[in-house]
Amino acid sequence: GIITNIGQNDFTGWASSADDVVDEYSVDVPADYGISVSVSFDTGEVNFDVALALMPNPASNIIDISQTPSSPETVTSNGTYVGGETVLIEIYANTGEGDYNMTIWIFTLDTDGDGFYDEDEITCGSDPDDASSVPQDTDADGICDVMDYDDDGDGYEDANDSFPLDDTEWEDTDNDGIGNNGDEDDDGDGWTDTEEYQCGSDPLSFNSQPDDYDGDQICDPLDDDDDNDGYLDSEDAFPLDAEEWLDTDGDLIGDNEDIDDDGDGFSDAIEITCGSDPLDANSLPLDTDQDGSCNAVDGDDDNDGYADVTDAFPLDAGEWVDTDGDGTGDNSDVDDDGDGYPDNSDAFPL
């Protein structure tokens, strides 16, 4: 091999299509450097080719080849990394013979010394001649963002990542600028994700919200008083009706609306008026004469034609007068006036 220095190296040689068809030179290229070779013959009567190949199998590892009819002919490693490798320079004399000049340039791949190869900086959009201008590589994976399909290295391609430069976020369901991982309310429906999980709704769907009958921001599955009527659901016959909570007779009509709470056939109003319990089916208004008017409001409880106020026996339809006040009505008393003489022999029985 020939010894080269960083920068320009000039050599001379002679080639002939008759007895020196191919000249070969091996060169060790330092790491992070490339190579360029230019060959020109002193006479224009020589037709020649120049090739650059990678050792140790140059025949199958051609890097560059120049077959132009003009001189000089140049080959370069640009596009192929040869740093730390041995390359082979081949000069073919196809026709003619003569002396030639060969210039070998060993050039740095990183002109500004910023740690990024010039070729990569050009591709990545930074300035290869300015050490302060370096390719952006968010995830420090060695692939600049321009060429990296996943800039932040979070496993989600940039095309599908709402936060391509933030490896802690990749989705923003409600488009509020806060990624789902940091957003307490992913779908922006006013319910936190935790609440939605607890309440059984979908935290990623705005249209799926917890049931909250009374609108107190406590979902029904967690609210012990869904309708906020002051009665616990466990004790409320109508947990989703703030106007009802009790159904004494089990007829599915709440007591507040039901005119006969205990279902005994007497309206609550009548029972209250008549003194019976409107919440107890076994407590019925007293209606001695069964005329549909309870005794409390009936002017003639026994329906004997005598008003209760003048009826000595207001609950006995067979009696209404007790002349002698002995507790036995005149109709059944054999001595109405109690004078000791039976009515049937008393000229004045009363």
Image (cartoon, rainbow, N blue to C red):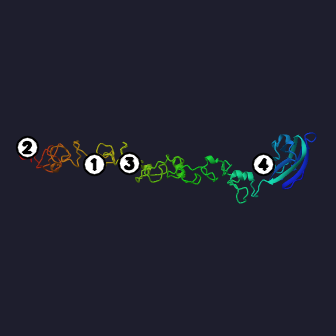
Q: Nearer the viewer, mark 4 or mark 3?
A: 4
169 left or right of 344 in image: right
- Side of 210 where 142 appears, left or right: right
Q: Residue at x 87, y 44 (%)?
A: 91
The span from disc 1 to disc 2 (Cα, nearest Å) is 53 Å
The residue lying toward the viewer, choosing from 280 and 203, is 203
What residue would you read off at disc 1? 269
Q: Amino acid at mark 1?
A: Ala
Give the residue at mark 4: 78
The mark closer to the camera, 1 or 2, is: 1
Depth check, front residue: 10 or 267:
10
In this rendering, which labeled residue sits more in front, label 3 or label 2? Answer: 3
Labels 3 & 2 near each other (Cβ < 8 A): no
* Element class at badge 2: helix
Location of residue 248 in the rendering, given as x and y in whole percent from the top left corner = 36, 46
- Residue 9 in picture, x, y percent from top left: 86, 54
Which residue was labeled with disc 2?
345
- Does the residue at mark 4 contact the one at mark 3 (Cβ under 8 Å)? no
Question: Which amino acid, by three-letter code, is at mark 4?
Answer: Asn
Q: Amino acid at mark 2?
A: Ser
Q: Which residue is mark 3?
A: 246
Dividing the picture into quadrants, the one containing residue 95 is top right
Disc 4/disc 3 C-alpha distance (Å): 89 Å
Q: From mark 4 to mark 2, how far is it between C-alphas?
A: 156 Å
